[in-house]
Amino acid sequence: MIVNPDIERFLLELLPERNPVFHEMEQVAARQNIPIVGPVVGNFLAQLVRIARARRIFELGSAIGYSTAWLALAAGPDAEVHYTDWSGDKAAVAREYLRRLGLLDRVVFHVGDAVEALRASPGEFDFIFNDIEKTRYLEVLELAPAKLRPGGLLVSDNALWHGRVLQPSDESSRQVWQLDYELSRRPDFVTSLVPLRDGLLVAFKLMHG
Ligand SMILES: C[S@@+](CC[C@H](N)C(=O)[O-])C[C@H]1O[C@@H](n2cnc3c(N)ncnc32)[C@H](O)[C@@H]1O
């Protein structure tokens, strides 16, 4: 665990009430070992969506729709949030949770490869959330910046990859490390690595390059 457990508990205590469906999803994810972002990061994603006034959102790697729900709730009724996962079973579960949360009409489902779905989606997005397999992070790095509008955010989960970015010795840690470094150094982005949970890389695409 990267964040001190006492600090983690304090961060959880600070959160406002959330719909009981979110609690249910958290319990299901814990029981079934589905790695979701959890409520502290979910709340932070929702804050970023509101700050960026994001309406058109693309998520790479959505599983049971937990982070999708945080994004879609924050983006408001006229949002268009793209859900992606290659598991049709997970997409069906997500669809049911999003229906119960009253968010289904703002979500577009893609079952299949998330990077290919982003490549095939026309137009620019206000917000891209990257949470797929880490051995595809370099493909996301190559594709996502051009799919983002100036003033938009590219946010990647697991930017610390359980601390393995400190000594990247396998393909996943190498790709996460490279994404962190390259986005942090790009002159057309302002980027911060926020050490919440497993680390979130928040990259803001500048208006004027
Ligand atoms: C970490 S989980 C996503 C959790 C979700 N973002 C949340 O926090 O609620 C990653 C999911 O992405 C899916 N996935 C991983 N790589 C993918 C890819 N290249 N294309 C489509 N789905 C992918 C997996 O099936 C898994 O359900």
Image (cartoon, helix red, strand yellow):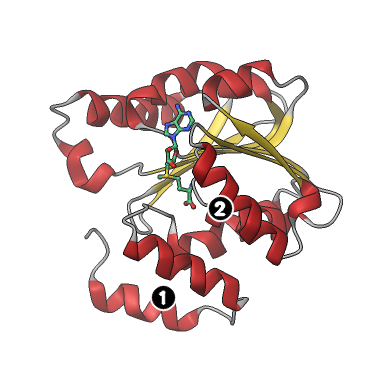
Residue 62: in sight, yes or no? no
- CA–CA distance in space, label 1 to label 2: 28 Å
Badge count: 2
Q: Residue at x 57, y 44 (%)?
A: 91
Q: In which quadrant is the C terminus drawn?
A: top right
The amino acid type, in three-letter code, at marker 1 is: Leu
Which of the pair 71/196 is nearer the observer?
A: 71
Which of the pair 113/59 is nearer the observer?
A: 113
Numbered tag placed on residue 22 in the rendering? none
Quadrant of res 77: bottom right
Which of the pair 50/63 is nearer the observer?
A: 63
Picture layout, residue 176 above or below residue 70: above
The answer to which of marks 1 and 2 sits earlier in the sequence is: 1
Label 2 CA crowd tier, 10 Å (few <14, some 14–19, many 20+): some
> Secondary structure under badge 1?
helix
Which of the pair 26/48 is nearer the observer?
A: 26
The amino acid type, in three-letter code, at marker 2 is: Val
Percent position (x, y) of residue 108? 72, 39
Which quadrant of the figure shows ligand 1? top left
**Disc 1 marks which residue?**
11
Q: Residue at x 65, y 31 (%)?
A: 206
Q: Residue at x 27, y 42 (%)?
A: 161
Percent position (x, y) of residue 100? 69, 66
Q: Residue at x 37, y 81 (%)?
A: 10
Asked if residue 136 lies left or right of residue 147, the reply is: left
Percent position (x, y) of residue 144? 57, 24
Q: Nearer the viewer, mark 1 or mark 2?
A: 2
**Disc 2 marks which residue?**
93
Quadrant of res 31: bottom left
